[in-house]
Image: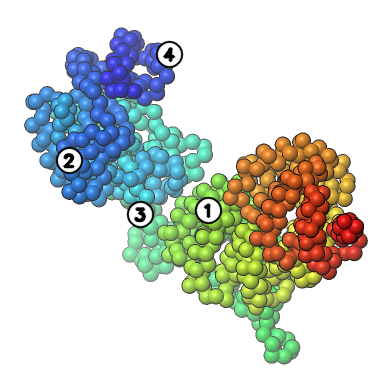
């Protein structure tokens, strides 16, 4: 919309409602216009009228008439600056991005065109104010570079261009915690104070005037511009303030100063603390600003921590009487910093007991040692004794835990038991320790819970998930029990347990445990960043297992940001990169996954060495990502390295070793080495049975994989039995809608239809497809696999039109997806064409499918040879006998060498050879 037309509409709207009662303005304006920006600007002008009606109405006509001047457009020049694009507009003016037009040097700037200031009397004053603002240099304040007037006489300012998000938007995107918000607020206050030291007040502090850069630093915009708009220095600038953040004296048109900026910062502080925007209008300027603890919603994690100090700081900053506010922005910032440092805040005016409590909290370690506090008043001896006793208890617990673990090593030492000179394994040490817990620590619940946590985590790390879960659950209960009361340690055990459950594909249980850990930490004032980062990481893994990928990524990124601030940041960031790579693989972003995992692997090699568990875990996920890209040989090489390392680090009886066997089996199956794949599956099942038991999810997942091999080898009935056993266990133990159970349900349905039991297969695949549809995007991998299974069922049921519609609807969703999924879609398209008798089209479709198989598995692999059979059948139907014979000759030796005699593909080969021989 042209500027002239827009401002004419603004004036018409203003005139239409200005004589109505203020409470009727919004409703009438909403009836007259659907333009939200126009409505907002009209309300701002109406609000300004109510502040000083006698002197606002006259300038208003002049203001609107000046605003109706033709608006500048991108490409126009102002002095040496060329406007590039319009960024925003508001009550004060229009903002453009601009660049140098004279090519003397390259610089991107923001140009602000100020409305309503074109009379000569103010020109000199504006030039003087610009000189003052241009001298305002601070890293958190956008610089003023230049200024002037347009051809129409309107002034403009040339300012530093800042790449960043408005404060409120940045908080919504990055979800900083309470301490991060307060630290950001303090840095903002320091910038405002620096401006005040140059006798420059802002007059319009609000979230949109505070941009947060990519590095987390705030940058303040528009310093002093509202004051520039104040022609007589006595409050005309109130027309251009934002009522929600403006001090009462600003709204009333009285002189403004430092205290006005303090008030605006106080409102910003309330919003940051409550994580919720305050809606204050002109009519609310005489009402007190609500306390942050009262304004925060029930979902605010730190709501309870706002009562007391932070409520008091906000109340003082937002006092309606300027004389009762902080005397300076520096005083406000210092009080917030005192809170962050656990010092007594000035706004509380607390007793000496309150101040002592803050001092003890700040120096809690020193307060635990009696010699450090001997000089304190006798009145507080009882508190010192309590702290000293706590320190002594901690030392005693640590000593007893150490003695217990030492005795466990001695009990596991074969030389102590007369078994020769061989060394005890880590598993033997842990078993010895676990066996002694109940017998020796029954009377020491605190020590017992600590030991259970330590040994449980150790079992988890050596790949003994069942024993780890038992001990970690016991540790959580013990650490929270009456008489022990160690919530911080309990939260750590909960996070470890949540990770364990997520890895065991029990995403719902894992999420509940991770959220419980976060709730415990939120209630602890002394909660540290490492514990919270651990809990958020566990939550991300739990959500990822349930395929809530966006929420999982947000949780993992939040954990990563917390870990950047920790002393062990490089190691923690390597773990975070690993988990993001895992997430991207699960979401289907294989290129992003590979990049993140390669970075994590490089970091882990540098930090932990090549022969470490850290390298093993990341290399495992990287191999899976490469396999999904069709790079099977590379993936198989990495998994062989992992198998050797797992056996070296953990021995044969470890979940890590079973995982390496399982992955090697799957890769060799795809590469066509069926005998080797079967051997690996058998070894994986044997280890899983010993480590987790035959009634465990991990065992059933491996059993499901073995079923796919039996199906490929030509034994569909054996495969069906294994698929059914895996599905029934997962459904019973995990629930029917668990992702792992749904995958097993689809596999069983597909196996049933491939042996001709279509009626039994239909409800299984249909139910799984409906369940996935409620939680996944249409192009999610599990959704695509299930819909391909449904298309195959339609094809086998003879519903060719429906199958064709399903496959066509799926076609655009496979762009950028893993080669295995793309191939399955192409093979079904080719089979459908063949069954419908469209031989020439089927030949083309099978040729494309075969090329995809060769690219993924190699031309001599059985995984490619099995698809030469339907291709040869299509060639024969199309009359291309020689080409069909060539495909049969290439496929027959490979298939007959590895498939069961009498199974489907050898029978089809026999029929082909018979037909081709007669031909």
Residue 84 visible in the shown view: yes
User: Disc 1 or 2, which lies upstream in sequence?
Assistant: 2
User: Disc 4 or 3, which lies upstream in sequence?
Assistant: 4
User: Disc 3 or 1, which lies upstream in sequence?
Assistant: 3
Q: Which residue is mark 4?
A: 31
Q: Which mark identifies residue 341? A: 3
Give the residue at x 72% y 63%.
670
User: Residue 628, located in which quarter of the rendered image?
Assistant: bottom right
Give the residue at x 20% y 20%.
66
Q: Position of residue 650 (x, y in %)?
A: 66, 74
**In terms of depth relative to the viewer, which is nearer, 441 or 740?**
740
Q: Which residue is mark 2?
A: 80
Bin the neighbour count of mark 2 within 10 Å (Cα to Cα): few under 14, some 14-19, many 20 and up: few
**In terms of depth relative to the viewer, which is nearer, 364 or 919?**
919
Is 774 on the left-hand or right-hand side of 754? Answer: left
Q: Which mark identifies residue 556? A: 1
**In which quadrant is the N terminus drawn?**
top left
Q: CA distance from mark 2 to mark 4?
A: 44 Å
Q: Secondary structure at mark 3?
A: loop
């Amino acid at each position: 919309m042209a500027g002239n037309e827009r401002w004419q509409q603004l004036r018409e709207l203003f005139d239409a409602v200005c004589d109505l009662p203020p409470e009727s303005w919004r409703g009438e304006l909403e009836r007259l216009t659907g333009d939200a920006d126009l409505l907002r600007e009209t309300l701002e002008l109406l609000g300004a009228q109510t502040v000083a009606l006698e002197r606002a109405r006259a300038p208003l006509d002049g203001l609107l008439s000046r605003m109706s001047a033709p608006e500048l457009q991108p490409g126009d020049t102002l002095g040496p600056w060329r406007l590039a694009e319009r960024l925003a507009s508001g009550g004060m003016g229009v903002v453009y991005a601009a660049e140098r037009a004279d090519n003397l040097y390259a610089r991107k700037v923001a140009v602000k065109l100020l409305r309503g200031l074109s009379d000569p009397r103010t020109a000199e004053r504006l030039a003087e104010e610009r000189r003052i603002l241009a001298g305002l240099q601070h890293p958190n304040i956008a610089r003023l570079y230049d200024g002037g007037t347009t051809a129409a006489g309107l002034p403009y300012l040339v300012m530093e261009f800042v790449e960043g998000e408005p404060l409120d938007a940045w908080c919504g995107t990055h979800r900083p915690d309470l301490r991060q918000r307060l630290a950001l607020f303090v840095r903002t206050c320091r910038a405002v104070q620096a401006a005040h030291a140059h006798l420059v007040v802002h007059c319009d502090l609000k979230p949109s005037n505070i941009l947060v850069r990519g590095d987390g630093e705030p940058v303040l915009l528009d310093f002093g511009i509202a004051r520039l708009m104040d022609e007589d220095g006595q409050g005309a600038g109130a027309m251009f303030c934002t009522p929600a953040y403006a001090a009462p004296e600003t709204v009333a048109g009285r002189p403004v100063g430092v205290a006005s900026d303090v008030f605006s910062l106080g409102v910003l502080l309330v919003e940051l603390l409550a994580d919720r925007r305050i809606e204050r209008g002109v009519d609310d300027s005489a009402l007190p600003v609500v306390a942050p603890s009262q304004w925060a919603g029930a979902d605010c994690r730190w709501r309870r921590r706002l009562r007391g100090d932070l409520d008091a700081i906000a109340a003082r900053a937002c006092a309606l009487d300027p004389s009762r506010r902080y005397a300076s922005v520096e005083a406000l910032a210092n009080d917030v910093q005192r809170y962050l440092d656990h010092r007594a805040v000035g706004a509380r005016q607390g007793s000496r007991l309150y101040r002592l409590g803050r001092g003890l909290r700040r120096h809690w370690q020193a307060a635990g040692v009696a010699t450090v506090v001997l000089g304190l008043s006798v009145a507080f001896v009882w508190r010192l004794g309590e702290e000293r006793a706590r320190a002594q208890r901690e030392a005693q617990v640590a000593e007893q835990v150490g003695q217990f673990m030492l005795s466990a090593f001695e009990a596991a030492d074969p030389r102590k038991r007369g078994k020769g000179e061989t060394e005890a394994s880590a598993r033997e040490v842990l078993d010895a320790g676990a066996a002694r817990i109940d017998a020796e620590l029954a009377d020491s619940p605190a020590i017992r819970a600590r030991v259970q946590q330590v040994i449980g985590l150790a079992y988890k790390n050596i790949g003994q998930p069942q024993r780890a879960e038992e001990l970690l659950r016991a540790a959580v209960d013990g650490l929270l029990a009456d008489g022990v009361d160690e919530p911080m340690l309990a939260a750590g055990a909960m996070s470890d347990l949540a990770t364990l459950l997520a890895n065991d594909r029990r995403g719902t249980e894992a999420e509940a445990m991770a959220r419980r850990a976060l709730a415990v930490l939120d209630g602890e004032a002394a909660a540290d960043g490492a514990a919270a980062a651990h809990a958020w990481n566990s939550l991300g893994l739990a959500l990822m297992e349930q395929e809530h990928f966006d929420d999982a990524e947000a949780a993992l990124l939040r954990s990563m940001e917390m870990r950047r601030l920790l002393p062990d940041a490089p190691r923690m960031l390597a773990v975070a990169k690993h988990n993001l790579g895992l997430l991207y693989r699960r979401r289907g972003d294989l290129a992003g996954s590979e990049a993140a995992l390669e970075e994590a692997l490089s970091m882990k090699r540098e930090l932990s060495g090549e022969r470490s568990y850290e390298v093993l875990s990341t290399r495992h996920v990287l191999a899976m990502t490469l396999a999904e890209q069709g790079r099977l040989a590379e993936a198989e090489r990495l998994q062989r390295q992992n198998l050797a390392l797992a056996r070296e680090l953990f021995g044969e009886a470890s979940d890590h070793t079973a995982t390496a066997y399982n992955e090697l089996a799957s890769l060799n199956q795809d590469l066509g080495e069926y005998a080797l794949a079967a051997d690996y599956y058998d070894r994986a099942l044997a280890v899983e049975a010993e480590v987790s038991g035959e009634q465990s999810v991990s065992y059933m997942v491996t059993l499901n994989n073995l079923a796919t091999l039996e199906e490929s080898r030509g034994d569909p009935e054996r495969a069906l039995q294994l698929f059914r056993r895996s599905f029934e266990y997962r459904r019973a133990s995990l629930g029917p809608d668990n992702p792992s159970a749904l995958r097993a349900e689809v596999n069983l349905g597909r196996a049933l239809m491939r042996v001709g039991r279509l009626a039994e297969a239909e409800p299984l695949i249909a139910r799984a497809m409906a369940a996935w549809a409620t939680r996944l995007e249409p192009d999610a991998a599990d959704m695509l696999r299930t819909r391909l299974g449904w298309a195959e069922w339609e094809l086998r049921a003879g519903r060719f039109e429906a199958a064709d519609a399903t496959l066509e609807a799926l076609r655009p969703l496979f762009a950028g997806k893993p080669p295995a999924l793309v191939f399955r879609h192409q093979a079904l398209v080719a089979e459908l064409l063949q069954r419908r008798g469209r031989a020439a089209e089927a030949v083309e479709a099978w040729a494309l499918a075969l090329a995809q198989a060769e690219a993924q598995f190699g031309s001599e692999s059985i995984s490619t040879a099995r698809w030469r059979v339907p291709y040869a059948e299509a060639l024969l139907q199309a009359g291309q006998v020689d080409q069909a014979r060539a495909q049969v000759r290439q496929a027959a030796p490979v298939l007959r060498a590895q498939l069961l005699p009498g199974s489907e593909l050898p029978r089809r080969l026999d029929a082909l050879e018979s037909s081709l021989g007669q031909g």
